[in-house]
Image (cartoon, rainbow, N blue to C red):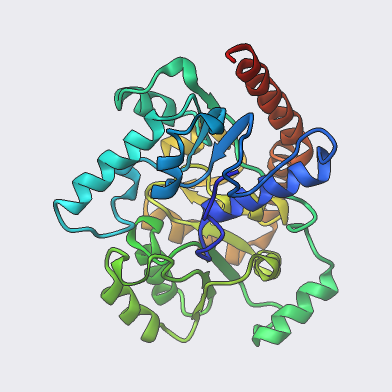
Amino acid sequence: MFSSADKVAGQGVGSAYKELIGLLKDYFSDEFEVKINDYHASDLSHYHTIDPQFYLSTFSKKRGRKIGYVHFLPETLEGSIKLPEPAKSIFYKYVISFYKRMDQIVVVNPTFIDKLVAHGLDRNKIKYIPNFVSTENFYEKTATEKADFRKKLGIPEDKFVVFGDGQVQERKGVDDFYKLAQTNPDIEFIWAGGFSFGKITDGYDRYKDMIDNAPDNMKFTGIVDRNDLVNYYNICDLFLLPSYDELFPMSVLEAFSCGAPVLLRDLELYRAIIDGYYQKADDFADMNAFINKANQDRSILADYKKKSKKAANQYSEDNLSKIWYDFYTSQYNIAKRDK
């Protein structure tokens, strides 16, 4: 494994990486010998991030069969980070160049396959494997535990809570989330996340000002440790991710696993992976209408809670362990055959 994904807190890439490492340790410690950022000879080298030193290592024969994990494309970085030209064009070309160095590509969303092919990659070398979360880390807590955490945050038990999670940036739809809080002062809105990219975050100054001047019913927690996130998913009445662009957001899987009803902007990529498990919204008006409807009649959320639990079963660690075992085994067999 080659990764620096866990060096920057609050990123989905890091969460996905940690989940996979945990899965291999829990399920296949006797089958696979896993080394992390170790440059000795290996049969398989799985690259989770596109660090320059990792790119250089792909030219070594010691790397064996090279597997690239695609969590983003150049076009999906728009609205996340702000780079001046020509640095932006150079970086985007570097991203695609890195992917082309791989013998096998893994995407977390099938809609990325055609986009990678359009960038010049071989369709036959691209495989879709969805993200997943461990139920040991994300699970539904007891009513007492939920009440205790609400009390800790100073939120009344009967207060309707909408929770969102992700980096504070335009792409995540934070503007709509903020506007919803302003429009609904009787509802508590909580956003967990910060500026993982620091001041190069697109719109940093504007979002910093929003955080500093948030309405009384809006809390920006900053980056929350994954071990604490489970508490926020558990106390919310509704999880909302108003993103304009995503791959396979870990936050949605985490919400599913905790049994939280989910409201999402209606994106094409969601239809390919989690259709039927969440409430769709086209825009701010749709989000606002559903939130108010659910606040007035909370019984309607019971059905969405059931849908979340079904989704959690589909994208469970147990199900994905079989898929990853078959994938790594097949890649190992190809590596041996090609020696």
Nearer to me, 294 or 306? 306
* Residue appearing at x 60%, y 47% in the figure: 38
Question: Where is residue 82 drawn, in percent x and y?
Answer: 25, 60
State which quadrant residue 151 falls in: bottom right
Question: Where is residue 321 drawn, in percent x and y?
Answer: 75, 35
- In the rendered view, would you say 86 is above or below 217? above
- Where does the C terminus fall, quadrant-wise? top right
Evaluate whether residue 266 shows in this view: no
Question: Where is residue 43 drawn, in percent x and y?
Answer: 64, 29
Nearer to me, 3 or 219? 3
* Residue appearing at x 62%, y 16% in the figure: 334
* Residue appearing at x 53%, y 63% in the figure: 7
* Residue appearing at x 50%, y 38% in the figure: 270
**In screen coordinates, is 82 left or right of 287?**
left
- Toward the top, the furthest residue is 337
- Where does the N terminus fall, quadrant-wise? top right
Evaluate whether residue 71 shows in this view: yes
**In screen coordinates, is 259 left or right of 337?**
right
Nearer to me, 230 or 101? 101
**In screen coordinates, is 234 left or right of 181?**
right
- In the rendered view, would you say 280 is above or below 169? above
- In the rendered view, would you say 323 is above or below 160? above
Nearer to me, 124 or 207? 124
Question: Where is residue 141 drawn, in percent x and y?
Answer: 80, 65
